[in-house]
Image (tube, rainbow, N blue to C red):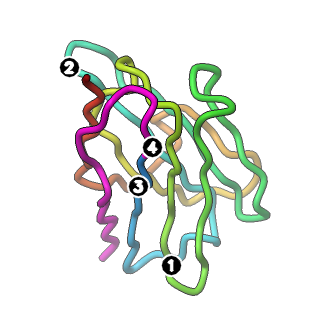
Amino acid sequence: QVQLVESGGGSVQPGGSLRLSCAASGYTVNRYFVGWFRQAPGKEREGVACIESAGSTRYADPVKGRFTISRDNAKNTLYLEINSLKAEDSAMYYCVASVFFGRCSLVAGAYTYWGQGTQVTVAS
């Protein structure tokens, strides 16, 4: 049984930073492409970053230069480093895992497994 458990969310001021973690069980994070999505109230779910099995990464335009996706294969954990936080980054952040190789996707339909989410709130 695959489980993805996110942690690290919280409430921060604009300009602050957070590091989100996603511990995987029943799934190997470096075998297929994995990523992070977010959804704010009243808005559509949005893919923000993904990483391929070979290590290449991809980011949505609104987060380029501020977000960094990475993984620790030994810990079987996925990370999302979020810097220079803005109010519009406030959302529930979800760790996602696919069963596909190749170029990673920022489309929700590409992912089979989803975590429960961790809330990020940016407010002064």
Q: Amino acid at mark 2?
A: Pro
Q: Amino acid at mark 1?
A: Asn
Residue on which the image places disc 4: 17
Q: Could you tell whether 85 is left or right of 50 in the image?
A: left
SS of the residue under disc 3: strand
In the picture, which quadrant includes the N terminus? bottom left
Q: Amino acid at mark 4?
A: Ser
Labels 3 and 4 touching (C-beta < 8 A): no
Residue on which the image places disc 1: 76
Q: Nearer the viewer, mark 2 or mark 4?
A: 4
SS of the residue under disc 4: loop
Q: CA distance from mark 3 to mark 1?
A: 14 Å
Q: CA distance from mark 1 to mark 2?
A: 30 Å
Badge 4 local density, few (<14 within 10 Å), some, or many (20+)? some
In the picture, which quadrant includes the C terminus? top left
Of callouts 3 and 1, the N-terminal one: 3
Q: Looking at the image, how many numbered discs can be counted on the residues? A: 4
Based on the picture, tell me whether residue 2 belongs to the magenta stretch.
Answer: yes
Of callouts 2 and 4, the N-terminal one: 4
Badge 1 local density, few (<14 within 10 Å), some, or many (20+)? some
Residue positioned 53% across, 32% down in the render:
107
Residue numbers of the magenta segment: 1-17
Residue 77, percent from left and from top: 48, 72
Labels 4 and 1 touching (C-beta < 8 A): no
Give the camera-side residue of 102 and 106: 106
